[in-house]
Amino acid sequence: MSVRTEQQSRQRILVVGAGMAGVQTAVQLREQGWPGRIALVGEEPHRPYDRPPLSKAVLLGRAAGSAFDVDFRALGVDLRLGTAATGLRTGDREADTDAGPLPYDHLVLATGAEPVPLPGAEGVPGVYLLRTLDDAERLRPVLAGRREVVVVGAGWIGAEFATAAREAGCRVTVVEAAGQPLAGALPPSVAARMRAWYEEAGAELRTGCAVTGVAAAGTPDDPVCEVGLSDGSVLTAGAVVTGIGARPATGWLAGSGVALGGDGSVLADEYLRASAPGVHAVGDCASYPSARYGRRLLVHHWDNALQGPRTVASGLVAGEAETPAYDPVPYFWSEQFGRFVQYAGHHTGDDEMLWRGDPADAAWSVCWLRDGVLRALLAVGRPRDLTQGRKLIERAAALDPLRAADPSVPLKSAAR
């Protein structure tokens, strides 16, 4: 046994957060050879589960849950569920929880993100968020009962919930304060092409309209919500589902000495180390510096929670000298209104936008270039474009714009 391995065998790693990022951190630590103790702490009482199925399969009753197929006992992972982290004392190397303090030698923050509540609607019967398994279970009777639903926010989660609600036969109105759906993620010229998806699915999309208030009506057994809008109209619904964004779940780190950004994210470095000694951060709660894009990125998507733990585990087991800097091509997908939407990379308003195919068709893509180099790609119903585009982004490939704009030409063949 090497001196390093012998030292590690006496050390304790505490992972706070039992979602994808936390579970994968524990798995990767064992797979990469960590010999010491590992404790995984999760706030929810449920066995750790995957979140993407919540917005469709679980909501529609097609799945009872989505628990990870991980044998924590066989991995030698001390799984502590129903335990919420309440504070952190980095000087003492202890995390405070509602079940008492937990000591550590190394700490991995993997608490994810929490949905932003609709201001003034907290505690109003019939108003829901969708993040946890319990949230999905509470919403299942709403869909099963084909209640009229108002969705606040036409972002990714709003579109996915609206899709499930329409499949269940609910009447759906989606309210968005911005002028287009996905306003924070895509340029107006691209997002505008998605407006028709709502109408085709039988959902009403009302943009440029903010919610001014939500009032409870009906009875406790049959709640009804009255949703006031900035145009003076009032919508009546059996349920209001809020999807106006998410923020890192890092409030419990106040006063800990762990540096946070203005967006609330843990400011991790290129090896996903936090500012405090012995602390790493991974997944939705952490931002990291991207050399590829020349800026710090905060990525709230499944693939980031899957990839980051490999870097954290490598840094802890083998050391940073043996670990490549964390700088993946961001990737996510969304299934909405019968379409498979995928995105890879990161774009800004300074990038050149190139259409690939006709957005009036069922399948099309958009490329973003800077100085001819592919930086990001959005693919609607064109998974091959996404697969090839992601590889081209990884190697900073320059594209021939004329060939790239021709959807009959494989994207990889447009590389110069």
Image (tube, rainbow, N blue to C red):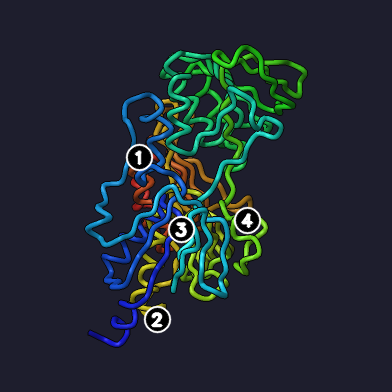
Local secondary structure at mark 1: loop
280 horizontally vs 6: left or right? right
Residue of label 4: 264
Assess whether mark 1 and mark 3 are in contact (beta carbons under 8 angstroms).
no
Nearer the observer: mark 4 or 1; the answer is 4
| Residue 305 to residue 76: above or below | above
Residue of label 2: 321
Mark 3 burial class by Cα count in 10 Å: few <14, some 14-19, many 20+: many
**Sequence-earlier tag: 3 or 4:** 3
Q: Amino acid at mark 2?
A: Ala
Local secondary structure at mark 2: helix
Q: Is residue 118 visible?
A: yes
In the rendered image, residue 28, in percent from the top left (x then y), is placed at 31, 63
Label 2, label 3: how many angstroms apart (C-alpha)?
25 Å
Q: Is residue 402 visible?
A: no
Residue of label 3: 16
Mark 2 burial class by Cα count in 10 Å: few <14, some 14-19, many 20+: few
Q: Residue at x 54, y 30 (%)?
A: 193
Assess whether mark 3 and mark 2 are in contact (beta carbons under 8 angstroms).
no
Residue of label 1: 408
Nearer the observer: mark 3 or 1; the answer is 3
**Sequence-earlier tag: 4 or 2:** 4
**Sequence-earlier tag: 1 or 2:** 2
Local secondary structure at mark 3: strand
Local secondary structure at mark 4: loop
